[in-house]
Structure formats: structure tokens, C-alpha cells
Amino acid sequence: MDNSRNTINSSGRITADDLRRKLQRQRTQSTGTGTARNTSAQNASRPAANTAARQKLSDDVFEYDFVEKSVSDSAKAKPVQKETVRTAAPEKVVSNGQDDDFLVFNSESGTASSPAAERPSGQGQILTQRRQAIANAIASERRAQPQQSASRPAPRNTNQRPVQSSRRAPVQQSGGNRPTSLPQKKSKESSTGKKIVKNILRVLLVILTVIVVFAAVVFVSLRLICSNISPAAKNMFVTTILETGQLKFLASWFVSQEEIKQIVDQNKMEDFDREIDDSLINIGSKGSIVAGQTETGEEEDIQVIEISGTTYYANLIIVKDPSRVSVATIYPWRDVGVTLDKLVKDSGAIGGINGGLYNSYNNSGGSAYGVVVSNGEIQMNEPNQWPGLVLIGLTEDNILQIINIEGMSPADVEYMIKDKKIRDAVTFQEENSDSNNHFVQLILNGEAREMGGKGSGLNPRTVIGQRADGAILMLVTDGRGKGGHLGASASDLVNIMLEYGAVNAANLDGGSSSCMYYNDEWLMTSVTFYYSNASWNLPLAFVIK
């Protein structure tokens, strides 16, 4: 092909071969997203890929598409071949929102024209001399090579988009065969798991810190209490802690054994062993006016009295008829006992208080210790199971008995029960040593027990007593911090019982076991925090029918 045919003009700025090679490169880059058109009505559906490619051209570079349209045999017309030349030259004018950047080449006539040239000049259409020159050069070359049109592949219908599979191949990372979404999901789960573990560790650290701080405060406080700064506080701590079931060891942590013995002796209760004088009890008689009675000496069959002391709060139930008081048990014994409200209801009673010694380890409460008599039946007879056991019960004549059974054999106990006609009874422990500070006898035959100091520490207490007219007194106090109270001492109990006319009175199992239930209501629950809405599990109780 000679130079006169390939050059556009004598200036030699752009040749048709240059444009063709440019077009071929653009088609290769666009990979099948050409802009072939069958009619001018397809102008609106030009692919975005050609538009993007066209914008990259310089002012002197033009993109063109060849469109061959065959006339059907029925039309019997000679095929007309048109060549559309489009340009992205900046000097083009678009009027009324239509794209006018194309020329139409008629291969039969050998002329090129632009629809913009046929429009009225008022529409602002401009065809520059350079664009016309380029169009004429292309037309001349097309006339010289008609065979190229026949060999050109049939244009594609741009209105039909390639069908894509509904499944997309997973995008793979360079380092593995799994989709990127799976590692991302695992990464999120791992991050969430780490946050949860971190939060749990923080909570545990806070709890541990609180426990350590609390323990340190308690330790320092006990150190100060057990120092010589306040001897009274030191005495109270030792005597109180020796009466607990599980914390006795704390006394030896802060105080030497010599000091413990000295404190116990200073608050020691004198030996007090008397045989009950039944003649002092005249059931149904009218004695002197005491607390709980009216001026005429009349009182209700059952009274509930609230008592407030300096270090305790208490409830006192007075049962006018002693025959209504008995011992209820869960016999035969088992591993786990029941709460006081269940004992009361199961026995057909309306109220009750906790009773004697029992297995309280881990709040099991399934069996009693010592001697137990219920409705005349001996349900347990082991008088030597613990040292210093004392029997507390009622005879068939409804007189309260407080009898020391230490050293008795089971046969001796059985004989004594039959001889004294004991119908209901429990046992508690009398022991005053550097390992225990338990006591039973408070008042015998109207005489109060002598004691040094307060006689004991401050703790929750349960007491049973009897007045001269036979009325039964049931007293329960709080303590160990409940209601802001430390509890009652032995001297407090003696004073309360004397105030309400007791002739005989005995201390029962106290501490966390102390509780009172009456008329479907808890009058005193356990002082233990996690049983503060009820009582510990018990195997027995004094109940009111």
C-alpha cells in the first residue's frame, strides 16, 4: 500500500493504518465488549467499556467501529454497508442530550457524512475540517479494499448480554484454597471469643481483688481487736468465736492458748446442777403479774412478744397451755433434714423453734445427736456421743425437765425416761473449755445461774423455759451481724427469762440454727446469708400444736 493511499493529508499527522492498529488494540483490551450497532436506534446501548476507552484517547485519536448490515433476501435490495466513525474529540457538540460523535460511511457511494451535518445549524452541530478529512481518507481506503468487509466477522448484538452462571467461583487467597469469607468468619469468631475470655478474666480479677481486700480488712481488724487496745473487745471476740461451729480456730490465730484460757475463766459460768422441783410448777394457777399479762392476770393462749436489746433483737412466744408443746422429728433419720416450716406443718403444728444437737455438717441436718424422745418414743439413745450432754424435755405432767445425763449409759437413760415419764425431749451440750463454750442451765427452781462477766460471747440464741403457772416460754434472738446485731450473751438470756417469769430455763442449740416459725410466717430466720429466708435443715424441733 503506497504512501499516498495511507496518509490522511500532506501534514502526515495520522494515517488510516495507525487508526486501524489503534482500533485493534482497543478491541483486544475490551475483550468482547465492542460497540457494534445494527441501526442508529442502538446508540443508547453502547457498552460502558467503549466509552471508558474512548475517553482515554487524545484529541487526535479516534475510535471507529465497522458495522455491516445485510438486507434480507425478501427485500431484494443490494446490501448496504455502513461504517460508523466515532470520535471523542473535545470539539464535538452535543445538543438536546444526544450523542453526535459518529460519522456514517456508505461503502457503495464512497462518501462519509455525519447526521449532525444534516441537522439545522440552530442545534449547534459542528463538523470540523479535520474530522471530514479523516472520514474521506477512511472511505477512500475502504473502496480500495472491498474484500475486507466480506472477511470481517459478523457483528454481535450488543443488546444480548452473555449469560453468567448463578454460581460464582470463590475468590481464593494466594496462600490457600479456601474462600476468603471463611477465614474472615473464623477471624471474627476468634476475636469475639478473645473478648469474652478477656471480660471473664477481668470480672474474676475484680472478684479476687474484692476478696483479697475484704480478707485484709478483716485480718487487720481482728488483729486490732485481739491486741491490748481494748480488753473488752478481745474478751468478746474469744468467747463468741468459741461458740461457733466452724470458726473456733480463729481464736488461736490471734490469741495464745494461755490468753484463751484466761478469758474463758474470766467469763466462766459456775457449775449449776439442780434437780427440778416439780412443786414449784402449778399448771393453770394465777401467779404474780409478769410481762405479757394484763392487770387481771388474763392473757391469750399464745402470745408473740418482740424484745429489743443493745446487741440483739428477739421474739418470745408464750404458750399458756404446756401440753400443746412437743418434739417433732423426721425419724427415721436420714442424710438430709427439712426446714423448720416443714417440720411444723408435717406434724400438724402451728409454730415452733429449733431444738437440740444435730448433724449440721454442710447443712445436712438428717440426724440428731445424744438422746431424742418424741411422743413417749425413744428415737435416739446415745448419751455418751458428746461430753456434757443435758436432757431438756417435758414430762407427761407437762413440767419442763433439765437433767444432766453425762456419764449415764443408754440403759440408765432409758430407765430415767420411764421413771420421770418423759414424753418429749432433746439434748444439748454443757462444756466450758478453751475449745468450746456451750452452756445449758440458765435458771433452775427460780434461781439464776452465777457467771463471771457476761458468761458467754454474743451469738444468736434459742431458749425454752417454763413459768410457775406452767406456761412455756420460747425465745429466739438474732446476731452475727443480722439486723446490725451481734447477738445475746448468757446474762442477756437469764435477764429476759427472769423478766417474763421463768422458774426453769435452758439454752438450746443456737448460732445459725436459731429460728422461729409461727402461723405460716417466719419470725426469725437463720442468720446465715444464703439461708436468710428460711432455716437450716433440721432433724427435730419443739413445736406448738
Image (cartoon, grey):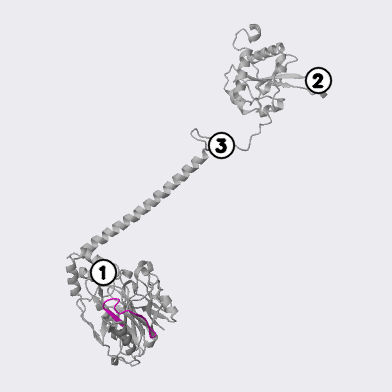
**Relative vertical location of residue 430 with respect to residue 181 in this rendering, above or below:** below
Please state the horizontal and vertical placement of residue 251, each as a whole percent of the image: 23, 66
Q: Count residues near mark 2 (Cα–Cα under 10 Å), then give few for <14, some for 14-19, many for 20+.
A: few
Question: Front-most of 378 and 300?
Answer: 378
Q: Answer with the quarter of the image where residue 443 lies.
A: bottom left
Please state the horizontal and vertical placement of residue 528, each as a whole percent of the image: 35, 68
Please state the horizontal and vertical placement of residue 533, each as a whole percent of the image: 40, 70
Q: Answer with the quarter of the image where residue 7 lies.
A: top right
Residue at disc 2, secondary structure: loop
Residue at disc 3, secondary structure: loop
| Amino acid, disc 2 | Ala
| Marks 1 and 3, the one that precedes in the sequence | 3
Q: Which of the image's four quarters has the N terminus?
A: top right
Q: Which of the image's four quarters has the C terminus?
A: bottom left
| Amino acid, disc 3 | Pro
Q: Are marks 1 and 3 in contact (CB under 8 Å)?
A: no
| Amino acid, disc 1 | Ile
The residue indicated by pointer 2 is 77
**Residue 125, label in figure:** none
Highlighted magenta segment, given as a residue range: 374-391
The residue indicated by pointer 3 is 170
The residue at 29%/56% (across/down) is: 212
The residue at 34%/54% (across/down) is: 206
Q: Nearer the viewer, mark 1 or mark 2?
A: 1
Q: Count residues near mark 1 (Cα–Cα under 10 Å), then give few for <14, some for 14-19, many for 20+.
A: many
Q: Answer with the quarter of the image where residue 526 lies.
A: bottom left
**Relative vertical location of residue 311 with respect to residue 49 in this rendering, above or below:** below
**Residue 241, label in figure:** 1
Inter-mark Cα distance, 1 to 3: 73 Å
- The answer to whether 311 appears left or right of 540 in the picture is left
| Marks 3 and 2, the one that precedes in the sequence | 2
